[in-house]
Amino acid sequence: DAGVTQSPTHLIKTRGQQVTLRCSPKSGHDTVSWYQQALGQGPQFIFQYYEEEERQRGNFPDRFSGHQFPNYSSELNVNALLLGDSALYLCASSHDIGAPMNTEAFFGQGTRLTVV
Amino acid sequence: AQTVTQSQPEMSVQEAETVTLSCTYDTSESDYYLFWYKQPPSRQMILVIRQEAYKQQNATENRFSVNFQKAAKSFSLKISDSQLGDAAMYFCAYRSARYRDDKIIFGKGTRLHILP
């Protein structure tokens, strides 16, 4: 079992550009959440995808958008990059069992995005 | 809104000794879940221990145990017989028990150093 895989591992972009980060969930998982972890901070929830739709969203601007594909993999897109978008972006997957407290959320190793 | 506070940015402990990491949280909900996650230099967030708020008994996982004080909204982590591999960032986290409110709210973390 490969667990949650994210690509790329590192990325450098210029202010104003757009970026796409990718996440493949753990086998058997159908729910994908994205988090932003700024340096020296805890992760902050961006949004969650289930059944190819955004189910829940944190306090992030519309520049942050996402997508989930039929195979449950997901993309995070950030437009008009700002220096403040530099962070570690973590993806977490879980399985919706139709009841509170789904299976444990498993995290990937993240994508380190640097905006210059 | 729920918040999680970790007041110890860094801690150090001698190998084989015991250390306690502190965490307080704020919520108006009566049912929720609390977690401690470990983030080593590999960046992957690893679940250490989980506590359901409706359970009075403190959770234990091998050398890791918690002291859950619901009235005081306190949730500390005790690591016994500290090992070099325990060195990492530790995050206290909260999750609502509301159905499909899956976002995890993290504290800012405590960096734990293990002294040989």
Image (cartoon, rainbow, N blue to C red):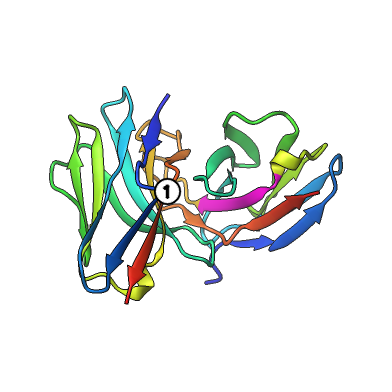
Image vertical order of residue B113 relative to residue B74, above or below: below
Q: Could you tell me residue A46's position as x and y percent?
A: 60, 38
Residue A66 as seen in the image, left or right of residue B48:
right
Residue depicted at 38% across the width and 31% down the height: B98
Q: Could you tell me residue B69's position as x and y percent?
A: 17, 38
Image vertical order of residue B16 relative to residue A67, above or below: below
Image vertical order of residue B6 relative to residue A105, above or below: above
Instruction: Pick whichever, B14 or B80, lies toward us.
Output: B14
* Figure quadrant of residue B71: top left
Amino acid bearing label 1: Gly
Q: Could you tell me residue B110's position as x and y percent?
A: 39, 51
Q: Residues within 10 Å of mark 1 (few under 14, many from 20)?
A: many
Instruction: Pick whichever, B46 or A67, lies toward us.
Output: B46
Q: Is residue A44 visible?
A: yes
**Residue on which disc 1 sits:** B109
Q: Which type of secondary structure does the marked residue at label 1 adopt? A: loop
Which subunit holds the residue at mark 1? B
Q: Is residue A64 magenta?
A: no
Q: Could you tell me residue A112's position as x and y percent?
A: 67, 56
Residue B104 as seen in the image, left or right of residue B48:
right
Q: Is residue A87 magenta?
A: yes
Residue depicted at 52% across the width and 45% down the height: A41
Task: List the single residue furthest toward the left.
Answer: B57
Task: List the single residue furthest toward the bottom.
Answer: B116
Residue depicted at 38% across the width and 43% down the height: B93
Secondary structure that dominates the magenta span: strand
Residue A64 as seen in the image, left or right of residue B68:
right
Residue depicted at 59% across the width and 28% down the height: A59
Image: magenta residue range:
A86-93
